[in-house]
Each structure stands twice: as C-alpha cells, then as structure tokens.
Image: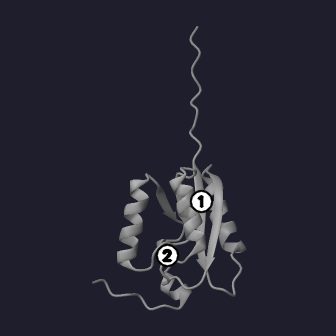
Amino acid sequence: MCASPQASAAIVHVALYAVTPQCVSADETLAELRSYATARGWQVADAVTDHGPLDQSTGPRPGWTLVRKAADEQRIDGLVVPAFTHIAYRWSEWDTARSWLLRRGLFVIATDPGEPAEVRAGLEPEPWV
C-alpha cells in the first residue's frame, strides 16, 4: 500500500508597507493590506508605515529602512503595498527599487494598482522622460 505524501506548502512571509499623510492613521491601510495577505495564506512578518508625501525619496524614510533590513535578513519573501508609488513615486527611483527587490528574489503586490496615487496624495503625475 502506497501512502500519498502530503504536499507541504511553503510559508510565504511578507512585509506590509504604506506611506500615509501625517494627519492620517495608518491602521486602516495596514488592516486592508493584512486582510489581502492573510486571504492568500501569507504570514505577515512586518507591518511598517512611513508618514509624509509619496513623492519623498525613500532614503529618509525610517519604515522603508526597516523593510530593507527585513529583506536583507531574508525574513520576507515579498511586499504588499497599496500601490507601487508607495515604494517609489518617480520612474527612476522605481527602477532602482525594482532592481534591488529582484536581486533579492522578492515579489511586490500592489493591492490597488489602478487607483491613481497622485489623486490620493494631491500630487501631479511626473512626465515620463
């Protein structure tokens, strides 16, 4: 009699990351990201926010520094963000961030990539150069 081996699913660990305005609590945004992740069976390793405008460089963002540390320590397999602009608003910065993420084998899921971030942030889109 052959016993069929049970498939052991790998556990996927993700970090939740969002940038919110100073006057807005990040709790609702993180709850939405957490719901998205847990609905897919992913474990949330970190839930991090930064406050400020989306068009700010990621360099001075303390939350983004924590996400990078989690990635460097291989504690996460991917990121869940409201929109890709939460990682980088400008194309050149996104290209750099994307390359960094790919080198570490991380995936990024934007839960609402169709929502124009510039509307939420009160910013005008930057022209593609």
Between 126 and 41, the one nearer to me in the picture: 126
Q: Quadrant of residue 67?
A: bottom right
Question: Which amino acid type corresponds to the residue marked 1 in the rendered image?
Answer: Ala
Q: Is residue 11 above or below residue 49?
A: above
- Quarter of the figure that contains the N terminus: top right
Question: Which amino acid type corresponds to the residue marked 2 in the rendered image?
Answer: Gly
**Crowding near pointer 1: few (<14 within 10 Å), some, many (20+)?**
many
Q: Is residue 105 above or below residue 91?
A: above
Earlier-in-chain disc, 2 versus 1: 1
User: According to the image, what is the colour scheme of the structure?
Assistant: one colour
Q: Residue furthest top?
A: 1
Between 1 and 20, the one nearer to me in the picture: 20
Between 73 and 53, the one nearer to me in the picture: 73
**Crowding near pointer 2: few (<14 within 10 Å), some, many (20+)?**
few
Q: Residue at x 55, y 67 (%)?
A: 65
Q: Residue at x 35, y 76 (%)?
A: 92
In the picture, the disc for residue 15 is 1
Q: Is residue 35 above or below residue 8?
A: below
Give coordinates of residue 3: x percent, y percent.
59, 15
Secondary structure of residue under mark 1: strand
Q: Nearer the viewer, mark 2 or mark 1?
A: 2
Q: Residue at x 53, y 50 (%)?
A: 74
Q: Quadrant of residue 36?
A: bottom right
Q: CA distance from mark 2 to mark 1?
A: 18 Å
For label 2, the residue is 59
| Count of marks placed on residues | 2
Secondary structure of residue under mark 2: loop
Between 126 and 7, the one nearer to me in the picture: 126
Give coordinates of residue 37: x percent, y percent.
61, 57
Please say if the residues under marks 2 and 1 sit with CB atoms less than 8 Å apart: no
- Quarter of the figure that contains the C terminus: bottom left
Give coordinates of residue 19: x percent, y percent.
59, 77
